Structures are given as C-alpha cells and as structure tokens.
Image (tube, grey):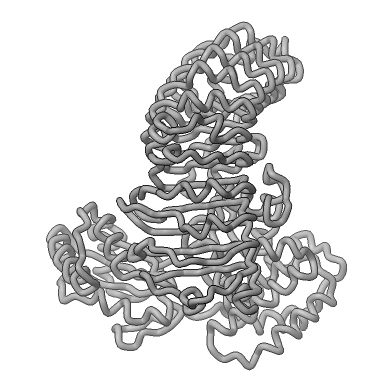
Amino acid sequence: MALLLVEAAALGTAFQGLLTANIFSTFSMSVSKTYNLIGIIKKLFRYNDEQVPWFQNEEDAVNQLELMLKRKVESGRILLVLDDVWSRSKSVPDKFKFQISKYKVLVTSRNEFPGFGSTYNLNMLSEEDAKTLFCHSAIPEDGSSSSMPSEELVNGIVRRCKGFPLALEVVGRSLHGQPVEIWRSTLMKLSEGESIVNTEGELRNCLQSSLDALDDNDITLKECFMDLGSFPEDQKIPATALIDMWAELHKLDKDGIYAISNLHKLCFRNLLNLVVTRIDANEIDWCYNDAFVMQHDLLRDLAISQSKQEPIEKRKRLIVDLTGNRLPKWWTKEKQPRLSARLVSISTDELFSSSWCSMQLPEAEALILNFNQTEKKYELPEFMKQMDELKVLVVTNYGFCSAELTNFSVLGSLSNLKRIRLEQVSIPTLCNTSIELKNLEKLSLVMCHKISQAFASGTIQIPEMLPNLREINIDYCNDLVELPEGFCDLVQLNKLSISNCHKLASLPEGIGKLTNLEVLRVSACTLVSKLPDSTGSLQKLRVLDITGCLLVRKMPKQIGELRSLREFHMRRCQGLCELPSSVTDLVDLKRVICDEETAQLWECFTHLLPDLTLSVPEEISDLNWL
C-alpha cells in the first residue's frame, strides 16, 4: 500500500523512476499503537544487515541511526516508509527527519501530520465504487436471498459507511443472505451513530454493527473474535495457537475442526484474513500447522475495547500491553484485586525488566505471554503458581533472535495444564527441574533452540515428565540434529509432527515403540534420507507425511506392515527412485499425495490397490509464510 502511494503522491518523475528501477533502497516499518522507538531503530539496523549497537537511550539510538543512514546513502537513495502511524504516535516521524541528501521519509496514516511536510490525501471511495464493493460482499452472486433489499436500503447503508473500504466489506458480509429486517435494523444502528464526527469513530461505529450481528447468530463466534485481541498488533497469529485456546476456553473439539470452521466464518465476514500456506494443509488429519491469521488493527482495537467495557475485576479477558516497566495502577496496588478473567494476555517490549508483580488469577484457563527480547532471558512469572485452572500456555518471542526461557518450576503446580506452545525461545533448562506435567496433552515448539539439550541432560526422564502427552509439534527448530531418544518412550503419543528442521538427519530407530502413533509428519526436513526400519511397527498409523524430504531415496521394506495407513503425503521427494513391493499390503491406503514422478512409481501397484487415489496437486508459490 505504501509503495503504491509513493507513485500516486506526485513525489517527482525522477524519484518515481528510481523507485520502479530499484536504484534506491526502500524500508517499510509499521508503527504500532504502542510503539517502541528503540525497537523500531533496532529493526532498521537489522534490515540493513548492520550489527545492532548498544543504545544508552532514545536520543543515542536516533543519533546512531543517522550515522548509519549517512553511510548507506553513499550506495544510493533511501526511502524510509513509516506505515500506519497512529495519532498518538505523531511525534515518531520527527525522530526520523535527518538532513541527509538522497534520503526521504514517507508516512502513511489515518491522520494528518501538518508539520511533517507535504500531504497527499487519499480520498474515500466514490459512491459508485462504494456501492459496488458493498454489493460484492453483501449480495450473493447468484442473486439468491430470502428477500432482496430495496435500492433505497442498500444506498442508505452504503452512505453511512462513509466510503471506508473496511466498513463496506465487513458490514456487507454481515448482511450476506440475511432477511430485509436485518438490513433495516443495521441501517438504524448506523444512523444512531451518525453524530460521531471523527474518522476513526465513524469507522468503529460501522464495524460495531457487524460485531453486534455476531451476538444474534453465534455467541461462540463472537467470543472467538474477541479473543483475537490477545495477540500483538500487526503480527501473524498461528491457527494452531487459536485451536489450543478455543479447545479449552469454548469447549471446541481438540482436533480443531470447529475452531477452523469459526476462522472461516470470521474470514467470510471480513473480520480477519485466514492464510493457509500449504496446498494440502487441511487434508492432513486436520493439520493446520501452516495456517495463520492476520487482522486489521482497527478490528483488533474494536475487540480490545469491547473487552474493557466491564470493570477490571469482572472482565472475561484481561489484555495488558506494557511499555517498559510502566505497570497499570491496579497492578501496583498493595492489595491486589481478585481477577475473574478466563483469558489473560500480557505483552511486553524490549525495555521490560522481567520483574513481575503479583497477580491473582484463580479462574484463568489460558495465558498468552507475548514479549520482544533478543539474547536475553525471559522469566516465567511466579504468579503462575497460583493459576490452578490454567489449561493453555502460549509463550511467543517476537524479537529477531531467540531468548532463553527460564523459571520452568512454576509449571510444576499446574495440574490442569494441557497445552503448551513455545515460539522463538531457547529451552536448555526445561528438564533441569523435576517438574511433572502429568496432564499435559500437547507440546508445540516453534523456532525453539536447544531442544536436544533440554531433554537429554535433564534430572527427570521424559516419560516421567510427560506421562500423558498425546501430541508433539516441532517446527523450524534449526539446531535440532536428532530427536531425543526419550521421545520414543512416550507410549501414549498419537501425533508426532516435525517440520522445517533442516539439520535433522534421521529419526531414532526406537520410534517403532510408539505403538499408539496415528500421525507421523516429517516434512521439509531436507537432510532426512530414510525412515527407520522400525516404522513398520506403527500398526495404528493412519497418516504418514514425508513432504519435502529431498534425500529420501527409498522406503523401508517394512512399509507394507502399516496396515492402518490411509493417507501418504510425499510431495517434493525428488530423490525417491523406487517403492518396495510390500506397498501392495497397504490395503487401507486411500490417498497418496505426490508429484507426477512419484505417481508413476505408484501406478505400477494401483491395480493391486483398487481403493487407492493418486493426487497430484498443482504447485503454487506462496510467500505468505515469510
């Protein structure tokens, strides 16, 4: 969006030509509602492949940024884009104004910054375009509806959306296929809010009417929408994190079928964007490890403001965004309030000292800890020990590099904890404490480091620590060379997923001991060259996925012993040159998802496997995962 504005803003023909020819560098940086100036500057250093210096304070950070930019302009022009700057962040652009030739700053915002230079106003949609966009969202393509709204009714709603594309799409989708009475009530709600004169208020009023419509149709769906405010602004939300939360908070199924259904419903209403980066992601036993959610910041803001309408003690969701060590007043009182929130989200930035105050959260079932630290330690808060009802823990580091997670001992008293998801953290001390997570069912480790060290050198054996674990997900853990042998003793395990671990060379032979395993996924592990012979002992295995294992040349002869196997995913296995004759014993095999070359290997056996379908999906390049 920002780059399109550059061309439209009449910045000068020569400058536009340079942009399109990529003769100068362009850096785009979103400025969130609760921004951190030093954090923004650190990102700019990293984007320029520069070592991040130590900054004494904000002034020092700005000065060192100026020096870095002066070095960079020697190689060509620089355009810095500060995207989506909020009104409360109006002082931010001035920090990046330097007297440097061949250096320009472009600010995109819903508000004007008169003192920052020339302004280009992007107009709202014309009435004709607004109506076209609205009708595209609101009226079924085949024209079918319980009763079609009148032209007057359509025009009335369109006018009250004030030409805001987001409002037109969201309001329109909430009316899709609805009876005329719902359209009329929506028009009344929008008309009641016409006294709001500021742009942001008008837009929020339009969006509020669509949120109210969720109450009438599906209470749980609205609750799921409200939960999205628990994640940081402008960040991708993993679908699996939402599945974990909603399975416990809203009693949805543990496999995530209803959760994903709700995501699709919210996506249909334009309340979020659901992105699935893997072609067959929704066909692998309901696996959504490769799916994520993005949400417009105003929709997130709406969800948070709705959550704050009740007194702090009575809120179902407690969402806390901390800047540095500035705590809200209620948190620093000598007598802590007893909070009834079931969902707790705490976000901290690089300046947070990790010194936690006490907090009473006796009813909390899900805790989301978002932080932004690099090469530091992040300590799990002591107040977790008293969170007796906690079932879901999601810890995510949004920094550029992993930070060591410490104080795992607080988990020992959480007897109801069922799901843990850790992202971008180092966990070398996980097993150094004698904690037993007796009821933990699912463990997800994403971009984590020192996994092997954590489970190999502990004071407690893995089966003792995780006696009832049913599912393990390991994704993008780049220093994982071998799977800890102790994982093979988790006899209750149903699902084991290892993906994008590019240093993993093999699976342990002991994997055959996982006799209850139903799903085995070893995908995009580019150094894995074979499956263990003991794989044939997995008599309950229903889904096997080796997608992207480029070095696998052949399957173990014992593969035919997988009598329960129903799906075999083996796309992008270019090294595979033969299949053992025992594949004819896979009598329950229904689908093989592969490339054309691999399909030719299977065609030799299809006459002996009459129920088998070979699927060759078209390859689609998708960079949304980046």
| Quarter of the image that includes the N terminus | bottom left
Is 522 on the left-hand or right-hand side of 109?
A: right
Q: Can residue 339 be seen at all in this image of the molecule? A: yes
Against 81, residue 455 (above or below) is above
Residue 183: where, in percent of width, then height?
79, 76
The outermost residue toward the bottom is: 195
Task: Answer with left or right where residue 625 lies relative to residue 191.
Answer: left
| Most foreground residue, 407 or 169 | 407
86 is higher (above) or lower (below) than 494: below
* Number of marks in the rendered image: 0
Residue farthest to the right? 146
Q: Which quadrant of the structure image shows residue 336?
A: bottom right
Q: Residue at x 38, y 44 (%)?
A: 426
Looking at the image, which residue is at 54% across and 23% down? 488
Q: Position of residue 462 (x, y in %)?
A: 51, 31
Residue at 60 percent across and 83 percent down: it is: 162
What is the x, y in percent for residue 380?
A: 45, 54
* Residue 28 in view: no
Seen in the picture, residue 116 relative to 354 is either above or below; the reply is: below
What x and y, as percent, mark residue 499? 49, 34
Which residue appears farthest toward the top when viewing the image? Answer: 581
Residue sitting nearer the eye, 564 or 421: 421
Question: Which quadrant of the view contains residue 385?
Answer: bottom right
Q: Quadrant of residue 165?
A: bottom right
